[in-house]
Amino acid sequence: MNHPVWDLPLLGSGWIIGIISIIHVSIAHLVVGAGIWLAIMEGRAQRAADGDLQAWLRSRAKALLWLSSIFGAATGVGIWVAIGLVNPTATQHLIRAFVMGWAIEWLIFAGEMATLIVLVRAYDRLKPRQRLVLYWLYAFCAWLSLVVINGIITFMLSPGKGWTASHAMWDGFFNATYLPSLLLRTFVALALGGLWGLAAGGSSNPTLKSRILKPTALFTLAGVLLAAASGWYYFQSFPPAARELVLGNLKGATSLAQGFRWALWGLGAFLVPGLLVLWAFFAPQTFRRPVALLGLLLACWGFGGFEWIREVARKPFVIRDVMYSNGIRVEQVAGYLKDGFLPQNAWARTFAASKGDTDLAKGEALLRSQCLACHTRDGYRSLKALTASNSEGDNVAFIQALRELDPALNPYLDRMPPFAGTEQEAELLGKYLGSLKAK
Amino acid sequence: MLLPPIPSPDPLLLPLPPVALKALLLVTFTLHLMAVNLGVGGSLIMAVHAWRGKPEDRDLVRRLAPLLPAAVTFAITLGIAPLLFVQLTYGPFFYTASVLTAVPWLALIFLLMAGYGLLYRFVGSAAAPAIHATSGILGSLLLLSVGLMLVNVTTLSLRPDLWAAHAAASPHGLRMNTADPTLWPRYLHMVAGIAAVAGLLLAGWGAWRRHAYARRVGLLWFIVATASQAAWGTWLLVRQPDPVFGLLMNTTTAPSLMMWISITCGGLALFMAIPASQAGAPAKAVWAPFGLGLAAVLGMILLRDQARDASLAAFGFHPEALPHKTDWLSLGVFGLTLVGLVVLLIVILRWATQPAPSAPAAE
């Protein structure tokens, strides 16, 4: 990594991204789906001249403004802050590649917030048709924001050879997984927005309840079913190596905890929302908000599972075939193997110098730069635990093997970046790993 | 002595000429700052007046506080763009500084959410007046602390010479940039500026809507906050590192000229605001200090940028020399989207300001 390293003990800095992004992507997709749901419901209410339903939808628009402005916008900035801390080199690369995309998305987001604020604050001044147009404009802007961000997210999984050659933004934007991912995210958004509508409708007054819950149940069901279908399409669009990695992870989930995690994702993403939909549709009067909220949380968890799979599929890269998860660009590896990592990395040298430039200090500097993006010393993916039974020689031999760029010689190449340093630097890192036992 | 560990810039070319990116940075930062002045400064002023609780204060809070959450929403939204352009141009400095002070930088998000949540509570609260005002004051203080986190990273990004010592003393990113003597004066200078401009905006609103109390207290906020800049501004100036201080004190340089023009505008605004704040002063007396005060802010924004480039030039960084290849297609899409946004805003703002229908429809 070209920058200093944020060394977060026990938890590992990657978890910070994970926690913030599960919250943000859930809210971000929810507001897209909820926007479309509100527009459809408002249209129905206006056609039926249902004033009570319109007034109730107005309160939902207010809640949506509260949700998207406090938590959606702030956690969106939060993801950006977090990725900049955890992997500044990759963040800088993405911003260089997609700054105009982000700038376009920013304009769209400004339109999204403006339409919702006007809808909520000037509601009484608006004619019914203007309200409906604003509901739809908000929904369209929110979805368009997803259309843009989806290009940047999918680029990280499948940048494509076109971009690698041209470095032109749109070559990277419209990549192999763009359309499947957009469909999947749109339908997930419908499911989450619908579940939010069910949760809100669950506590409405009895006369309104069935008028809200029945159409909302159908809306949610459409989202769940289409998300399942497009999820399969999305998975098929993965680069073959990424598909192998995910299937390998699924087959390897043999422990109780891993199995439970996959089962809970499946339940959250599909089964629980499906059951809730049936309940809300066939017995709306008995439907209750706490159950729907629990279902919504489980669905967010299930969606978090999808995001986790996407992360797994990218391994060992942060931008597939372009940059490894530790911020080293693929094209830099050969130079580091030949001429060394420390001489070419100012921050690793600075760290080693601050600890007296001993062998252990240099080894620790290498560990911070090349390993801490995914591991911790003695917490999450603990290097201390992983190397507990190794001798110093074993550690050195292991790191030497990680220097190999031939998959036949380095079996970890499909899930870990190669060690980018000289043989002597591999020894320094091996020595430092050995010293962890005594700490 | 080791050279400061400045990371090498990303190899991808900039998509626009550096001068265009600088213009976008300055324009979007100005918009962001105005929304911050309105939302955060306005929250502070409204919370203090809610605390005072006199009938005229309550009337002011009732009329203006509901606008605050939207202003803060726009402050956040408009803040994204300058952050994007700063990262694009000054990435090696910005990212390094943020990682070195990672925990306070990340805390910004939680402070923002907590402050924003309390602001909504302040605006929509039917609680007892003391609790209502306390929510507002706590909310505005939390929002002001977000500014401290931004100043913390910004000041550290300008001092690569402090990085190695900071990293050694704070390997987990816990420490703030307290070794830099400009941290506190810069923050206080910013807070006073926010309060002053919010006061000016309130005075302008009072003059526009013929609300004498708003006009008078707005100008009082401006006068007190601007007068305090004599302390914070001087403190900040004398604490600047040598190259920047020398530049500002040499009256033949552009940054120095900009500084003295801004100080003159601010000083004139202050002296004109004093008679305009007296009882019986005409409403139109607000507009001269209003215009001069805003001119001082614009000057300070330009000065801030010039001082940043001067600081980094001392470490061999020249943003204007960064290589670029203009991405015309993306620029075209950006332009079309901007036109679409402007049309959208014009239409919906016309709707928002039209007279309400005589009978509420369908309710």
Image: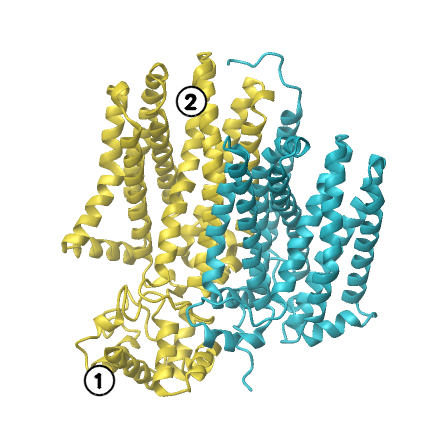
**Rendered position, A9 above or below B272:** below
Instruction: Identify the residue shown where x is 40% and y is 82%.
Output: A340
Q: Nearer the viewer, residue A363 or B336?
A: A363
Q: Nearer the viewer, residue B226 or B164?
A: B226
Measured from the top left, where is residue A388 in percent x and y? Answer: 19, 75
Q: Secondary structure at mark 2?
A: helix
Residue to which mark 2 is pinned:
A41
Measured from the top left, where is residue A307 in percent x and y? Answer: 33, 49
How busy is the neighbourhood of tag 1: few (under 14 within 10 Å), some, or many (20 plus)? few
Q: Earlier in the sequence, mark 2 or mark 1?
A: 2
Q: Nearer the viewer, residue A232 or B311?
A: B311
Which numbered disc covers residue A128? none
Residue A316 visible: yes
Q: Which one of the lettered chains is coloured cyan? A: B
Q: Which one of the lettered chains is coloured yellow? A: A
Decide if residue B147 is on the left or right side of residue A414: right
Q: Amino acid at mark 1?
A: Gly
Instruction: Identify the residue shown where x is 60% and y is 66%.
Output: B155
Q: Number of numbered discs present?
A: 2
Q: Are marks 2 and 1 in contact (CB under 8 Å)?
A: no
Measured from the top left, where is residue B40 in percent x and y? Answer: 60, 46
Residue to which mark 1 is pinned:
A393
Residue A143 visible: no
Instruction: Identify the residue shown where x is 70% and y is 66%.
Output: B235
Decide if residue A150 is on the left or right side of residue B222: left
Subunit under mark 1: A
Subunit under mark 2: A
Measured from the top left, where is residue B298 in percent x and y? Answer: 74, 53
Q: Amino acid at mark 2?
A: Met
